[in-house]
């Protein structure tokens, strides 16, 4: 038999009452927080106007690793935006071809310089000096640090030849550092600029990227470099940003993940570049293609240990296809 208080409510109920509004308020505030984040994300993704790059930052852009995949799509998009281009990549024929394509596509309204540079070479000082001079003398406002490579096949860390990982570090880490270092002095002098570094979900969205460990580690470097430079150079008028894509249908994705065509969750490089350019100059880290962000949202709900096991099993399957 439950004893009643004078107001006829049972003891147990009376004792809990003060907590119910408190818990409801906390729950409401948490939901409100999610709701506000969703509204901000929605308006930033679909309604925020892109920056007018030429006016905001300068009339020239540099794109590294620009003769294929994401880099080529960036070059095409920036040409359509009316920016003059400095194209940096390793294959002279492909550079000439792209340069001609872009000038024709814009009726020669833009200027294009090409620079042959293999970032995996031991000594890249000559090419970097040329970038430095151009970035100082021309109104270079946008730098897309896109060049990046990964393993030819999934491998345990101890199976990766020193020659292979040295090249990955030279291209992904030293390449990004050297080009950024070469371009920043001119931007600082002019008091404006945007530096976009292409990171990867491999270092940010998943807790680990087994059997592609060195690649993921170089991309974590790019992420941290970008976030610190963002703070360091903001007051110079320079916006540094790390873009974090998941899979995009390029040669790299075909090689490492057997992705041969685009889909809603795996955009073509052109669709990625379209979204990516809209984000230049805003957050220090962003995931420009919104279906990627949906995948990130769901990945966050999964415990790290499960994601680790899933990535490992994927890595092992890929290694089995091309055993050492
Ligand atoms: N694709 C994805 O799913 C994905 C996902 C996340 C992040 N990313 C990142 O996005 C960036 C671009 O990747 P992608 O998929 O577009 O790659 P991709 O299709 O393999 O294209 C790479 C580009 O870089 C050039 N390049 C490669 N090695 C070079 C070197 N040593 N020196 C100079 N240029 C070199 C290539 O030149 P050639 O034309 O001569 O081969 C090509 O133009 C990379 O940083 C990558 O890590 C890609």
Image (spheres, helix red, strand yellow):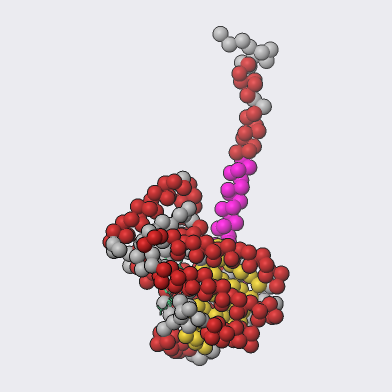
State whether residue 274 appears in this view: no
Q: In this view, does 200 lie to the left or right of 159?
A: right
Given residues 164 and 232, the one toward you in this image is 164
Which residue corresponds to the image point at 50% horizontal and 91% vertical from the top-left?
108
The C terminus is located in which quarter? bottom left
Inspect the magenta stretch and tell me whether residue 37 lies in it: yes
State whether residue 162 appears in this view: yes
Which residue corresponds to the image point at 69% horizontal and 80% vertical from the top-left?
190
Which residue corresponds to the image point at 58% horizontal and 48% vertical from the top-left?
34
- On the image, the x and y values in percent for residue 221 come to 54, 64
Outermost residue toward the bottom in this view: 108
Outermost residue toward the top in this view: 1
Q: Give the range drawn in magenta.
A: 28-51
- On the image, the x and y values in percent for residue 255 come to 35, 68
Magenta segment main secondary structure: helix
Q: In this view, does 243 lie above or below 99?
A: above
Q: Is residue 272 above or below residue 13?
A: below
- On the image, the x and y values in percent for residue 284 come to 60, 64
Which residue corresponds to the image point at 50% horizontal and 65% vertical from the top-left?
218
Query: Quadrant for ligand 1?
Result: bottom left
Given residues 131 and 241, the one toward you in this image is 131
Quarter holding residue 101: bottom left
Inspect the magenta stretch and tell me whether residue 138 lies in it: no
């Amino acid at each position: 038999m439950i004893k009643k208080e004078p107001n006829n409510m049972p003891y147990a109920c009376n004792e809990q009452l003060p907590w119910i509004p408190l818990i409801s308020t906390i729950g409401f505030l948490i939901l409100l927080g999610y709701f506000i984040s969703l509204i901000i994300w929605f308006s930033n993704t679909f309604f925020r106007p892109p920056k007018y790059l030429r006016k905001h930052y300068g009339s020239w852009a540099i794109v590294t690793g620009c003769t294929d995949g994401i880099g080529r799509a960036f070059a095409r998009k920036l040409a359509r935006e009316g920016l003059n281009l400095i194209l940096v990549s390793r294959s002279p024929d492909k550079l000439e071809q792209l340069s001609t394509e872009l000038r024709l596509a814009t009726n020669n309204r833009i200027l294009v310089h090409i620079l042959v540079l293999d970032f995996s070479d031991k000594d890249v000082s000559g090419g970097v000096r040329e970038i430095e001079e151009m970035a100082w003398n021309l109104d270079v406002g946008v730098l897309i640090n896109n060049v990046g490579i990964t393993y030819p096949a999934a491998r345990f860390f101890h199976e990766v030849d020193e020659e292979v990982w040295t090249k990955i570090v030279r291209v992904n880490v030293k390449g990004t550092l050297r080009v950024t270092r070469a371009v920043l002095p001119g931007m600082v002098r002019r008091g404006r600029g945007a530096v976009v570094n292409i990171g990867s979900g491999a270092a940010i969205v998943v807790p680990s990227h087994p059997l592609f460990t060195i690649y993921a580690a170089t991309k974590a470097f790019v992420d941290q470099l970008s976030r610190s430079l963002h703070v360091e150079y903001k007051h110079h008028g320079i916006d540094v940003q790390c873009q974090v894509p998941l899979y995009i249908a390029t040669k790299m994705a075909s090689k490492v993940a057997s992705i041969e065509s685009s889909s809603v969750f795996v955009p073509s490089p052109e669709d990625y570049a379209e979204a990516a350019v809209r984000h230049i100059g805003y957050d220090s880290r962003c995931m420009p293609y919104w279906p990627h962000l949906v995948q990130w949202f769901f990945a966050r709900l999964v415990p790290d240990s499960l994601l680790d096991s899933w990535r490992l099993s994927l890595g092992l399957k890929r290694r089995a296809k091309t055993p050492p």
